Every structure is written in C-alpha cells, then in structure tokens.
Amino acid sequence: DKEITNKNLKFAFNHAQKKIEGFNYDSRKNVLNYDDVIRQQRDLIYSQRDLILLTDDIVFVAKRMISSTAKSIIKSENYRFNNGSFDFEALAKFLDEHVSNVVKIKFSIEEIKVLHENELFEYIEEKFLHSFDEWKENVIDNYDQEMLNTTLRDIVLKILDIKWQYHIDTMDKLRSNINLVQYAQKNPFQVYTDEGTKKFEAMLSDIAFDVMISIFRNEYGRKSLIDKSIRQDPIFQEMISNITYNYALTQQENEENYLRMYKSIKARLEELENNSQANVFDDNLSHLQENNPEINNLEVPNDINSFLENKKLFDQDDSEKFNDVSEQKENLENQDKNDDDFFSIA
C-alpha cells in the first residue's frame, strides 16, 4: 500500500472521517438523552413504589389516588365542548357506565349541571371518598386492619407494575418511530421528550383510576352476610379451616353456604348437649335413689324439664340435693306423725 500524497484527496478523507466521528458522537449523545428521559421516569416510579412498600398509612395513599382520579375526570377534554364548557351529559354517562356499576352510587345530571368546576370536583371526590370509607370499614369489620392494609398495598403495587411495564413498551415504540418526524422539520428528541411526558402523565392517571375501580370491586369490602360474632366463634373458625374456598361461586354464595353449615353444626351440637344433660339427669337420679332408698316412692314426671322446674332437686350439688330430700321427708313426717307410710308426691 502506498501513502496518499495528493493533498486534496487527503483532505477529503480527513473531512469524511471527522464527519463519521461526529455522527457517532451525536448518535451516542442522542442515546444518552433518550435513556435519560426514561431513567427519570423510572426513578420517580421506583421511589413511589418504595413509598408504598414502606408506608404505614397505605389508606392515605389510596385516598390520594381517588382524589387524583376525581381531578383527572374533571380536567379531561373528553367531557368538554370546543368552547371549553362542560358536556355534563357526557360526564354523567361516563360516571354511570364506568364508575357507578362498581361504586354503587348514582350521579344525577340534574345535580351535576348546576355546579361550578371546583364544586363539581368536590361533588365527585366526596362521593368517591364516601364509598371508599364504607368499603374500608367493611373490610375492618369482616377481617381486621392488617387485612385492609395488605389488600390495599397489593392492589396498588399490582396495578403500578402492570402499567409501568406497558409504559416501557410504549416508550420503546415511540423511540423506534421518532426519526420519522425529521421529515416534518421537528427535533426528534424534543418530540420524544414531549410525547413521553404526556404518556407518563396519562399512565399515572390510569394507575389512579384502575386502583380506585379495583378497590371498589374487591369483595373483602362488601358487607358480609356473616356477623363478626360468628366469625370469632371457635366453631366457625374450625369449620372454615376445613373448607376449601369454591372459586366457582361468588363470595356471597360461599357465605350463604357457610352460614347453612354453621347453623346445622350448632343445631347438632345443641342436640347432643341436650341429650348429654338428659343422661346426666338419669345418672344423678339413679345415684340419688341408691343413697336414699326411700325416694323410690317418688312419682317422677315423664317431662324432665317439668320435673326439674317443679322439684328443684338438681340445681345444687349432690350433697345439697340429698339434704333437700331429707328436709321434704321431715316436713311430711311432722304433718302426720301417726302415718306409718312414707311421703308420696303426686
């Protein structure tokens, strides 16, 4: 190989090499810039995720998301006319179709259309938070505070993780297609930054909305058919520990089955207890007759409960029962000392 000695040719090669190096530098710089956008978003999401994991007041986080949802609904362009005024009919329709079916509250267009924007936000937020408070109290009544915290934390983290993964895929597609905007005489990186920020904010709104809907759909907060006193009954707890939850049924259907089983068990136990008491009565009567032969002349009613009520012989311990019989015998002897036969109670 010979050295290039032509000055013009050598200058052309050097110029081309510098341009290539410049392109590579710009390319690396753009990569870093694009990476920096997603890095900032990732840092924000991870910091929020850590907060959710560590906070002792997950209820506060849930309420903030619910309030944010109410604000996002009010600020949405979907429920405004071109002049910026509210389309109350569209707003009421959205609330009824997407919220009322899970929150179980009705949004009246007559009430909505007379409200100012700030009043409208407060109106919707109050209804959302009131429904959340009812759901929260039901979870605590049905279970406990720990179950409430665990349920809320699981709901928030699950939705956040799903939405974040979807957002990463969306940003990758945006980055792959961003060079097409060069033909529109726009800065690709600036377009990527602007669009990425909008998508990130939309993701946060979606997270808050989905968290609220998932909370209200969660059956732990539904008013239980089973009272807390029954849930705390050791018999019920033992029964539940031996039953496999039937996921083919709704929670209400499962609870109805639990109540039927519980009542059946309680009835059977009461029956066994009554039989046991009857056996104890027979044993006590036999013991009493063995130690007091004279009591064999007593005429015992067939109805055990009536006998216990009328004679009061078995409300005390054995020694007291024997004394009661002797006392009755003494009273009768005093009434008729000349009577050789022992007393008889009809």
Image (cartoon, helix red, strand yellow):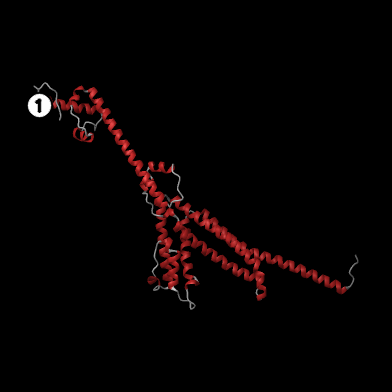
Q: Quadrant of the N terminus?
A: bottom right
Amino acid carrying mark 1 in the image: Gln
Q: Quadrant of residue 128?
A: bottom left
> Position of 324 compared to 269: left or right?
left
Q: Quadrant of residue 240?
A: top left
Q: Is 237 located above or below residue 58 in the figure?
A: above
Query: Which residue is farthest bottom?
Result: 83
Residue occupied by mark 1: 335
The residue located at (39%, 46%) in the rendering is 258
x, y percent for residue 293: 21, 22
Q: Quadrant of the C terminus?
A: top left
Kind of element beneath mark 1: helix
Q: Quadrant of residue 308?
A: top left
Q: Say whether residue 95 is visible.
A: yes
The residue located at (11%, 25%) in the rendering is 334
x, y percent for residue 198: 57, 68
Q: Nearer the viewer, residue 217 or 194?
A: 217
x, y percent for residue 344: 14, 27
Q: Nearer the viewer, residue 157 or 177?
A: 177
Q: Nearer the viewer, residue 254 or 125?
A: 254
Q: Is 216 located above or below residue 13 in the figure?
A: above
> Position of 137 compared to 180: left or right?
left
x, y percent for residue 24: 74, 66
